[in-house]
Amino acid sequence: MPTDNQTSKIFELNETIDDIARDAREASLLLQNYPTSDIDKALLLMATYLESDKARLQGENGKDLETAKAKGLSAAMIDRLTLSDKALTSMIRGLREVAELSSPVGEVYDERTRPNGLKISKMRVPIGVIGIIYEARPNVTVDAAAICLKSRNAVILRGGSEAFFSNSALCELFSKSLSEAGLPAAALQFIPTTDRTAVELLLQKDAYVDLIIPRGGESLIRMVVEKSRIPVIKHYKGVCHVFVSANADMDKAVPIAVNAKVQRPGVCNAMETLLLDAGLDLRKKASIINALIDKGVTLFGDEESRKLSDKIEPVDENALYNEYLDLRLSVITVDGVDGAINHINKYGSRHTDSIVTESKAEAETFAARVDTASVMVNASTRFADGGEYGMGCEIGISTDKLHSRGPMGVGDLTTYKWIVRGNGQIRE
């Protein structure tokens, strides 16, 4: 039973979240009155501020990093949290790329004229107010705000407590950019507390907020889905596979497998299971295994795969459903493309899956039948990313089937309205 003091704090916090959500709703309607050039101006101003205020931003980020290390956060989490020069450069590039994109808002399509003369069409419009709940990645603050604003949505940002100082500084700069571009600063809202109750309160504001997008660990996303009264677009985890066919070119297969696991193992599009075709030559299988071991990858395999090296440990079937998010990898032998497809559709997370093959028929079968948001043919799973897909930056990756799937860009944050134009028609 909460004390009177706790009840009072929750009441005050609820009023704060109400104000934030209401202001965002009003700003989302005002955004429709401004030309795209004003929004692009704000994005470019933000890119300039990321350059000019780099030292201050990294100073605030340093506070978060110090706390994260004291709490014993993993190396992967600290990597995601760090506003390095490289991370800031990537954010700046993403802002400029989004500014250069054409806006889908206002696009008219699916036009038709009825026998009675009514002209009917669809017009692409913003979703409205989007709440982003995320962990440990301050770059999401900029990416999410940029894509939401480009599609003329207002955004409410609630980052994790581990990035509080970084996110506060970034949002302050973004609000400044909006104001200087002549846009309503309330179109970007930051929840200024680390109190987890704020998330639960936000998830109840369905009168003001139209969509929630969580980004983070599976436990966070499941909590959001369970408690939200607002529609949620999400992916729970990234159990990504690379299938090396008996028809693979090993000059492609080895670097693809190594890149998919090693280049950045702590992200959702990293490979978690390597599938080896039973028909693949033994020496070719061993070449992949040895390349991974040489890169420091710990391997867990089924009985057939363990014959390739005494360094491969037995795999637990339950691990096939989960992300390692580090330099560990499952290795499973499958019977051709059908075996690979069956394995992925059973254990996969509908995120990203790759086939390495020189057989066009095999590639087409894999692409058609694997139940996944992104299919890679002769390419690393690490390309499943909005920036790599030419979207600029991304708002997140969806493994849902409604209303968006895969990396989500500007167009995925729009819906449509029907426009019916008449000349006095009435229905008989």
Image (spheres, rainbow, N blue to C red):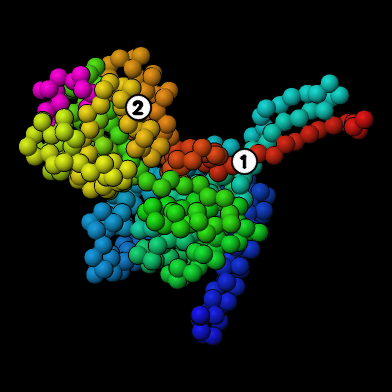
Residue 159: name its quadrant.
Answer: bottom left
Which residue in the structure is indicated by mark 1? 415
Three-letter amino acid code at disc 1?
Answer: Thr
Which residue in the structure is indicated by mark 2? 341
Residue 261: name its quadrant.
Answer: top left
Measured from the top left, where is residue 330 in percent x and y?
Answer: 22, 39
Measured from the top left, where is residue 369 in percent x and y?
Answer: 41, 24
Is 52 rendered above or below residue 353?
A: below
Looking at this view, is 94 or 312 the one in front? 312
Q: Residue at x 40, y 37 (%)?
A: 350
Question: What element does badge 1 sit on?
Answer: strand
Measured from the top left, where is residue 401 in percent x and y?
Answer: 51, 37
Is 399 rendered above or below residue 86?
A: above
CB under 8 Å between discs 1 and 2: no
Measured from the top left, where is residue 326 in percent x and y?
Answer: 23, 48
Q: Is residue 97 visible?
A: no
Magenta-highlighted residues: 276-290
Residue 257 in magenta stretch: no
User: Left or right: 208 with respect to 132?
Assistant: right
Three-letter amino acid code at disc 2?
Answer: Ile
* Main SS of residues in magenta: helix
Q: Is residue 190 visible?
A: yes
Looking at this view, is 237 or 171 the one in front? 237
